[in-house]
Image (cartoon, rainbow, N blue to C red):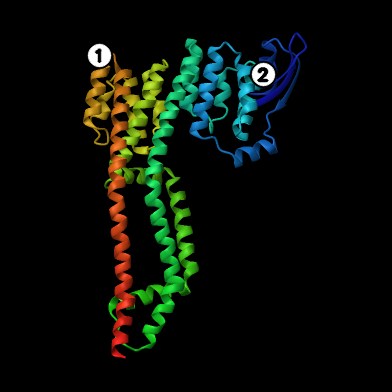
Amino acid sequence: MLFDFKAKKTDGKVIEGTVEAAHEAMARGLVQERGFEDIVIMKHRRSFLTFNITFLSKVSVKEIAIWSRQLSVMVSANLPIVQALKTLANQATNPLMSSVLGEAARDVEGGARLSLAMGRHPKIFSNFFVQMVRSGETSGRLDEVLNYLADQQEKDYDLISKIRGAMMYPAFILSGLLVVGFIMMTFVIPKLTAVISESGATLPWTTRLLIMVSGFFVHYWWLVIALVVGGGIGFFRFIATPFGRGIWDTFKLKVPIFGTLFSRIYLVRFCRSLSTLMIGGVPLATSLAIVAEVVGNSVFRTLVLDTAKAVKDGHPLTDIFQKHKVFPAMASEMLATGERTGKLEDILARLSTFYSREIDNLVTNMVSLIEPMIMVLMGLAVGVMVSAIILPMYNLANEM
């Protein structure tokens, strides 16, 4: 349970902060141990303003990376952490980030460690991030750890941005086609086919099919919209369950073309995160348990957790990896070599770099493949329109 407190230092300065304890008496005792006086303990409450900020705002990976680098520079310049956090909170343009850093500054000023203060905001600072900061505090290399974290966060951001940028054009074209198709079927096609239907001429099957589909859109357009919206909501609720997430993550790894891309993305996250944690001095078994929550796929998560359990039991790192097809054989062999030679961190970094380049090539090839596929799809749509509408109208004109 969290408790807010106000107290005075021996010099009379008033301190506000948060302390974690089982009950109020324990919280008061913990604050007294820090040498504070005139202690006032209150149950921790989130204000309505803080709730609105949390609900309406979001902190991006890029903002976390920038913040990490700025804090690293301040810590390396021997600036007190409390002062550094307050400075960053004041200059933050994101209201949520400013609020979180302000709370962290008060917690640290009240005697909490930086990692503990961050751990109270899991939606902003992941367990991976908190563990790295804790290792930096323990080893006395907090500035180096923060700088290294900033590098890794920037690499993750660049990877995500590159993939999103590559997929933006195909997604825009396909979305446009769907919207235009809905408008055509609901408003344009019925007027064009009305003339053909009234002529009483024998219509080809493509025209009859188009008239049926268009009629459905005209009379049940609300049902189409409801099915699309309801299907989307149902899908996201389904994948939010453990069973649904498992099916969806398995499908993503097996779907043609995209499956390889997804598996490489998860592999890069695994290698990069594990390398970062091990360089920070986090034990291998603990690092694996943390990476399992970071990798972002339930199939990989189960694989990594099984590996963590095997490592705790004294087995080599690659015992589990070599039995699963989702983990490339080359990666397993290189990790086994790194484990035997004591250069596991270096091997993980090399694998991360190698598969990052492979992702770049896959994305480039995928974009090159998707563009002609979209052109073919548009050509087929135009061909169907011509055969279903223009040709019957042309034949009707000739008969007249």
* Camera-nearest label, 2 or 1: 1
Work out whether residue 262 or residue 198 is closer to the camera in this orientation and state it: 198
Residue 347 appears left or right of 105: left
Between the C-alphas of marks 2 and 1, the distance is 49 Å
**Helix, strand or loop status at disc 2:** helix
Above or below for 160 versus 138: below
Work out whether residue 31 or residue 253 is closer to the camera in this orientation and state it: 253
Reading the image, the residue beneath label 1 is 341
The answer, for residue 73, to whether it is visible in the render is yes
Residue 116 appears left or right of 296: right
The answer, for residue 20, to whether it is visible in the render is no
Work out whether residue 244 or residue 108 is closer to the camera in this orientation and state it: 108
* Residue at 43% over, 33% down: 157
Crowding near pointer 2: few (<14 within 10 Å), some, many (20+)?
few
* Residue at 40% over, 28% down: 291
Work out whether residue 396 or residue 68 is closer to the camera in this orientation and state it: 396
The amino acid at mark 1 is Thr
**Helix, strand or loop status at disc 1:** helix
Estimate the x, y position of residue 200 in percent, counting from the top left.
34, 89
* Residue at 37% over, 76% down: 212
Residue 222 appears left or right of 268: right
Q: Tag on residue 390? A: none
Above or below for 377 versus 393: above
Crowding near pointer 1: few (<14 within 10 Å), some, many (20+)?
few
Q: Quadrant of residue 88?
A: top right
Estimate the x, y position of residue 172 in percent, counting from the top left.
41, 53
Earlier-in-chain disc, 2 versus 1: 2
Reading the image, the residue beneath label 2 is 26
